[in-house]
Image (cartoon, grey):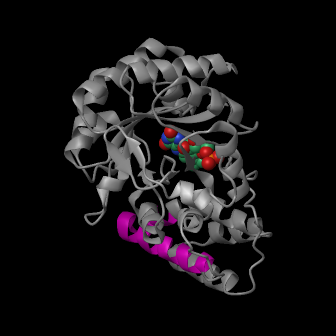
């Protein structure tokens, strides 16, 4: 049974997945536009993250290779892809399998299939969570990818379109039978835009139903949440989404003796601005920084004020000025970042 005292040891323990080994059990969840190579640099420099999942990549564009930014399939020349899992979205098994082959050839740790994204633009194309309505097609995608690659195959999914744990259990079994090596499960129904609490008890049911590792996900915003999720569900690891955006050092903090000092807020935000500029140029870099600012400012009691200032900054030089001005003074940091403002 995981407790506050054993958490660090557990999260730092390697996890065997499909013949490979993740160095730890705390993972960065896939996040469109945000799990990009610049942000991954910040997370990996702090350390402690067992595996990082990429932003979702459109399977049709993956065979075009690194640098085709539109599809998200991009990385830095110095990036260690052996710690990175590439998430794909698409609806055609053959296209998904072809993309997975390119992922494997480039040396990624594994490939992840997105059956969790419920945004309209993705579901309209019959991708993401839309595939949970047709489990046989979703399983055909898993099966096609399994046959195409020998690297670990992950599936990320939600409960489905109705709030019934039996649906999640049956999906999980199908994915395992189709050849998945690990599951990341976010126990919400597809139409729920993170407004209602996730059903962590469903994670326990999925874990009990399959023999492959299950990574729990959803609303882990502090250490206590992490202990509770693990203790209640017996899952094999935890994927952090929004908390990682707010505190990219959280993996190091929970898996080692790293203790953040107050200067980490300013320094990591400046580093992120620098890497976004280096990877995407000043204009796109500024736009992308605003997305992070929404989560990062949730660390502060008057975060909405800082967020407004950052959004009004005309360029990255202005962003840096605001950061230096407001984050060099006494910081009013909240213990648990408030994610309610930004979903
Ligand atoms: C901005 C944002 C983008 C996301 N993009 C993806 C995505 O591309 N693929 C995916 O499977 N999930 C995506 N998610 C869902 C997260 O991976 C995760 O399941 C969800 O945020 C719940 O975890 P959390 O409570 O730790 O944030 C996204 C979430 C956020 C906040």
> Can residue 282 be seen at all in this image of the molecule?
no
Q: How many marks?
A: 0
Does the magenta segment cover residue 68? no
Instruction: Reply above or below: 17 against 23.
Output: above
Q: Nearer the viewer, residue 22 or 70?
A: 22
Q: Looking at the magenta stretch, what is its main secondary structure?
A: helix
The picture places residue 132, in percent across and down from the top left corner, at 52, 20
For ligand 1, give the image quadrant: top right
Q: Nearer the viewer, residue 337 or 235?
A: 235
> Can residue 26 be seen at all in this image of the molecule?
yes
Does the magenta segment cover residue 275? yes
The picture places residue 175, in percent across and down from the top left corner, at 44, 23
Residue at image coords 69%, 72%: 309
The picture places residue 96, in percent across and down from the top left corner, at 31, 29
The picture places residue 311, in percent across and down from the top left corner, at 63, 66
Is residue 330 shown left or right of residue 281?
right
Residue at image coords 36%, 17%: 140
Task: Determine the residue located farthest toward the left in the rendered image.
Answer: 105
Where residue 80 sits, quadrant-wise, is: bottom left
Is residue 230 shown left or right of residue 300?
left
Where residue 335 sits, quadrant-wise, is: bottom right
Magenta range:
264-286
Residue at image coords 59%, 78%: 264
Residue at image coords 62%, 83%: 263
Instruction: Reply above or below: 155 against 48.
Output: above
């Amino acid at each position: 049974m995981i407790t506050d005292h054993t958490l660090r040891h557990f999260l730092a323990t390697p996890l065997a997945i499909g013949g490979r080994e993740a160095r730890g059990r705390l993972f960065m969840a896939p996040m469109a536009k945000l799990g990009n190579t610049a942000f991954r640099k910040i997370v990996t420099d702090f350390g402690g993250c067992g595996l990082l999942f990429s932003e979702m990549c459109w399977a049709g564009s993956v065979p075009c290779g690194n640098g085709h930014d539109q599809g998200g399939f991009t990385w830095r020349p110095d990036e260690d892809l052996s710690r990175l899992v590439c998430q794909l979205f698409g609806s055609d098994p053959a296209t998904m399998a072809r993309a997975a082959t390119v992922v494997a050839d480039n040396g990624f740790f594994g490939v992840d299939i997105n059956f969790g994204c419920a945004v309209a633009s993705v579901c309209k194309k019959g991708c993401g969570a839309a595939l949970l309505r047709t489990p046989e097609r979703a399983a055909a995608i898993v099966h096609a990818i399994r046959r195409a690659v020998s690297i670990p195959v992950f599936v990320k999914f939600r409960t489905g379109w109705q709030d019934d744990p039996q649906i999640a259990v049956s999906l999980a079994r199908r994915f395992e039978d189709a050849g998945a090596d690990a599951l990341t499960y976010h126990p919400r129904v597809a139409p729920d835009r993170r407004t209602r609490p996730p059903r962590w008890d469903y994670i326990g049911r999925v874990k009990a139903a399959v023999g492959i590792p299950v990574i729990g996900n959803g609303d882990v915003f502090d250490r206590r949440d992490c202990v509770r999720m693990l203790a209640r569900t017996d899952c094999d690891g935890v994927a952090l989404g929004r908390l990682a955006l707010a505190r990219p050092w959280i993996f190091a903090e929970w898996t080692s003796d790293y203790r953040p000092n107050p200067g980490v807020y300013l320094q990591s935000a400046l580093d992120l601005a620098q890497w976004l500029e280096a990877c995407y140029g000043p204009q796109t870099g500024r736009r992308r920084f605003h997305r992070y600012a929404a989560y990062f400012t949730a660390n502060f009691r008057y975060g909405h004020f800082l967020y407004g200032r950052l959004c009004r900054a005309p360029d990255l030089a202005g962003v840096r000025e605001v950061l230096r001005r407001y984050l060099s003074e006494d910081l009013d940091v909240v213990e648990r970042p408030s994610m309610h403002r930004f979903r």
